[in-house]
Amino acid sequence: MYPLREEYIAPINRFIELVNAVAGLQVVTTPTSTIVQGPTMAAMAAVQQALLQCYEEFGRAVFVVKYIPDYRALD
């Protein structure tokens, strides 16, 4: 997430908070990324909902997403 604003930490933290709140997903945040792992539709819906909520709360941002089917980094 690249918030299009000078104060960028709050939107990033909020996005991570929202994704972490979804039951049934494994979420790991590193200094450069957040990995969301779980059932495909649940993971995609969680990212979509967090993205939309952050747009409403903070305005526009750029999101870079990689979808890797059957990737099990957190297993």
Image (cartoon, rainbow, N blue to C red):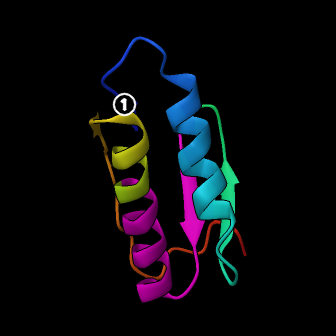
> In this orientation, which residue lies closer to the viewer: 11 or 74?
11
**Residue 35 falls inside the magenta stretch:** yes
Circle 1 is placed at which residue position?
2
**Residue sitting at the far front:** 57
The N terminus, quarter of image: top left
**Which span is picked out in magenta?**
33-51
**What number of labels is visible?**
1
The C terminus, quarter of image: bottom right
Snapshot quadrant of residue 67:
bottom left
> In this orientation, which residue lies closer to the viewer: 60 or 37?
60
Q: Residue at x 34, y 46 (%)?
A: 55
Q: Residue at x 64, y 74 (%)?
A: 22
Q: Is residue 57 above or below residue 44?
A: above
Residue 41 visible in image: yes
Q: Residue at x 48, y 15 (%)?
A: 7
Residue 32 visible in image: no
- In-image side of 1 versus 19 (left or right): left
Q: Is residue 71 above or below residue 13?
A: below
**Residue 14, image x and y in percent?**
59, 44
